[in-house]
Image (cartoon, grey):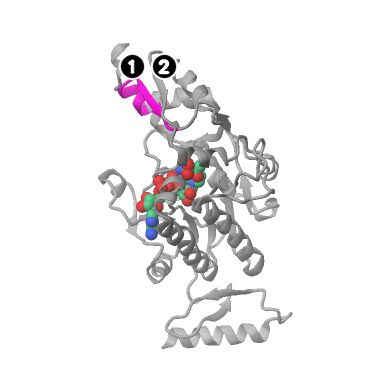
């Protein structure tokens, strides 16, 4: 059992050399068939040290959802195709499979995830696996497992292997007792969805691991994200993507939120740009480890008016879904992201008109609109 012997040796060396005796530099390592042990956060038997000039070796979990494929594309452009591994528990489409490394990774399988990190010498991990707000309410036990147990696996592996870890949070981490207009970074967070509860837990656990074990944890609270070439995975803000597809295909859209429901939203390119920027920001510029980011806020009515500039005949009707409406009514209306703008220079590129123009230029080319012109 050489690995176990090494772990034991490292732990006892560290305990002996720990100056303050308070164990602050220890990271939690799970049992490998024996009782849990502690090893130095800079233990070298699993992690590989890279020089400053080397590219990170990246793993993206839950990478086949709305955001992961776009993130992989951006990171591969920056760090090289083979330095970015996309993973999920689903089967990738051909174009995704052939665009760069893809691997099966179930975040609930701790040992397999650990093996992937070790064998591929991962140094940065983007943890995208999650059940979003609406699907989470429909299956609370699964959401609890994926969003909370899965996060625990990722945190322990990241701490053990000195990874830089990005975990996205969300506007959904706030609740009805939070200030909603605007919502600052630090305020009451009492969300009423399992999704929101799990994201507050992720923020707090990540920050705790940062202060307790030195984990390089970075987190952004995303607004609802709008993308043209990927579908949302079952959230409350999905209507703002679907409206474009339905307007183009049928000229009609039935919205499940009330016309005056205001929520913060963002175009995917801004979201991914912010994610890379905060991961590359020098640690000393980060006065916090969890930041709000913002670009625009609109209601279904305002979005419809903007869409009607491209599809004037769009017929918008409303059939309110009580579950999603209650969620939206408890979320921020406007997001205060002044700390991100001050600390690491966050700046969005897309406002509402720019977003709508971009969506139609992606989706509109072989649509009814194009045929009519
Ligand atoms: N899309 C948004 O509007 C938005 C907004 C705020 C925050 N976020 C966060 O960004 C991240 C990515 O969001 P998304 O929209 O791409 O989500 P998504 O729902 O589209 O994709 C999530 C992915 O997780 C995978 N997954 C589920 N169970 C898994 C498991 N056991 N192991 C590994 N993978 C598993 C799913 O197969 C899916 O591909 C999530 O953490 C989400 O909370 C998204
Ligand atoms: C806002 C976000 O976290 C996600 N799009 C949801 O609606 O659940």
Which residue is at the front of the view, 76 or 288? 288
Quarter the N terminus occupies: bottom left
Left or right of residue 253, residue 144 in this image: right
Q: Is residue 367 magenta?
A: no
Residue beneath disc 2: 310
**Quadrant of the rendered structure where residue 362 is?**
top left
Q: Is residue 309 above or below residue 29?
A: above
Cα separation, mark 1 vs mark 2, equals 8 Å
**Quadrant of the rendered structure where residue 264 is?**
top right
Measured as percent of width and height from the top left, residue 57 is found at 46, 58
Quarter the C terminus occupies: top left
Label 1 crowd (10 A; few <14 / some 14-19 / many >=20): some
For the point 48% across and 19% down, which residue is it?
306
What is the residue that sits farthest to the right in this orientation? 20
Left or right of residue 111, residue 208 in this image: right
**Which residues make up the magenta segment?**
245-256
Instruction: Pick whichever of labels 1 and 2 is earlier in the sequence.
Output: 2
Residue beneath disc 1: 369
What is the residue that sits farthest to the left in this orientation? 94
Left or right of residue 102, residue 310 in this image: right
């Amino acid at each position: 059992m050489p690995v176990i012997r090494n772990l034991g040796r490292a732990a006892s060396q560290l305990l002996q050399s720990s100056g303050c005796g308070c164990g602050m530099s220890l990271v939690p390592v799970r049992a490998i068939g024996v009782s849990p042990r502690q090893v130095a956060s800079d233990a070298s038997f699993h992690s590989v040290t890279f020089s400053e000039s080397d590219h990170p070796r990246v793993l993206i979990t839950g990478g086949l959802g709305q955001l992961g494929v776009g993130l992989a594309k951006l990171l591969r452009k920056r760090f090289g195709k083979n330095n970015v591994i996309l993973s999920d528990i689903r089967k990738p489409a051909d174009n995704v499979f052939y665009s760069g490394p893809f691997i099966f990774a179930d975040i609930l399988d701790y040992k397999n995830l650990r093996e992937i990190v070790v064998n591929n010498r991962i140094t940065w991990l983007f943890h995208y696996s999650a059940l979003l707000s609406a699907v989470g309410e429909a299956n609370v036990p699964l959401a609890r497992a994926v969003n909370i147990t899965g996060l625990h696996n990722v945190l322990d592996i990241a701490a053990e292997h000195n990874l830089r870890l990005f975990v996205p949070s969300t506007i959904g981490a706030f609740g009805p007792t939070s200030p909603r207009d605007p919502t600052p970074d630090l305020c009451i967070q009492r969300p009423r969805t399992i999704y929101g509860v799990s994201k507050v837990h992720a923020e707090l656990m990540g920050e705790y691991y940062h202060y307790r074990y030195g984990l390089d944890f970075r987190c952004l609270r995303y607004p609802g994200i709008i993308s043209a070439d990927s579908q949302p995975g079952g959230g409350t803000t999905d209507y703002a993507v679907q409206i474009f597809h339905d307007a183009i295909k049928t000229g009609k859209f039935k919205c499940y939120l009330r016309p005056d429901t205001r929520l913060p939203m963002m175009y995917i390119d801004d979201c991914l740009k912010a994610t890379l920027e905060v991961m590359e920001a020098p640690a000393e510029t980060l006065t916090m480890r969890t930041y709000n980011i913002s670009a625009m806020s609109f209601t279904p009515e305002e979005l419809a008016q903007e869409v009607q500039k491209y599809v004037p005949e769009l017929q918008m009707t409303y059939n309110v879904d009580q579950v999603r409406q209650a969620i939206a009514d408890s979320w921020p209306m406007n997001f205060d992201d002044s700390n991100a703008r001050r600390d690491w220079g966050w700046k969005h590129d897309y406002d509402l008109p720019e977003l709508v123009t971009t969506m139609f230029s992606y989706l509109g080319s072989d649509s009814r609109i194009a045929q009519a012109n």
